[in-house]
Image (cartoon, rainbow, N blue to C red):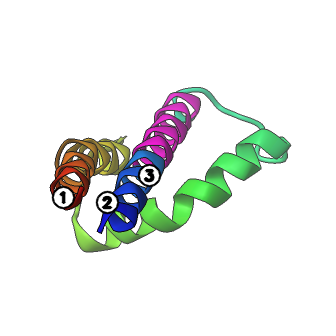
Amino acid sequence: MFILGNFLNALATVIDILLSLFMWVFIIRALISWVNPDPYNPIVRFLYNLTDPVLNWVRRTIPVNFGAFDLSPMIVILVIIFLRSFLVPTLHQIAMGLG
């Protein structure tokens, strides 16, 4: 059980780091959308390729456009914050309970 506890603890840490990085990618994407970025810039293309599948799914699932404002990045960021506040501590607590 000790090994499983260490594994869950490490998994929770990795998930926390990945969610944090993903949140920053969405924040940067939202900030870039305020200016008119060059769509052929490799960094812009990378950000769009990384975030578009998630944002398109949110846009199809929940109507979050209010005029010219697209709130789908905010919804994704809120979901990431929820996962970091609920899932990661829960995994850490389970790991501590296992040993």
CA neighbours of label 3 inside 10 A, class few (<14), some (14 to 19), many (20+): some
Residue 19 in view in this figure = yes
Q: Residue at x 63, y 53 (%)?
A: 48
3D distance between C-alphas at marks 3 and 2 = 9 Å
Q: Residue at x 28, y 44 (%)?
A: 84
> Which mark, by number, is residue 84?
none
Give the mark, 1 or 2, whose residue is nearer the N terminus.
Answer: 2
Q: Amino acid at mark 1?
A: Ile
Helix, strand or loop for disc 2? helix
The quarter of the displayed image where residue 38 is located? top right
CA neighbours of label 1 inside 10 A, class few (<14), some (14 to 19), many (20+): some
Q: Which residue is mark 1?
A: 94
**Residue 82 in the image, given as x and y percentages of width and height:** 20, 47
Is the residue 90 above or below the residue 4 in the image? above
Name the residue nearer the viewer: 52 or 13.
13
Q: Amino acid at mark 2?
A: Gly
Q: Amino acid at mark 3?
A: Ala
Labels 1 and 2 touching (C-beta < 8 A): yes
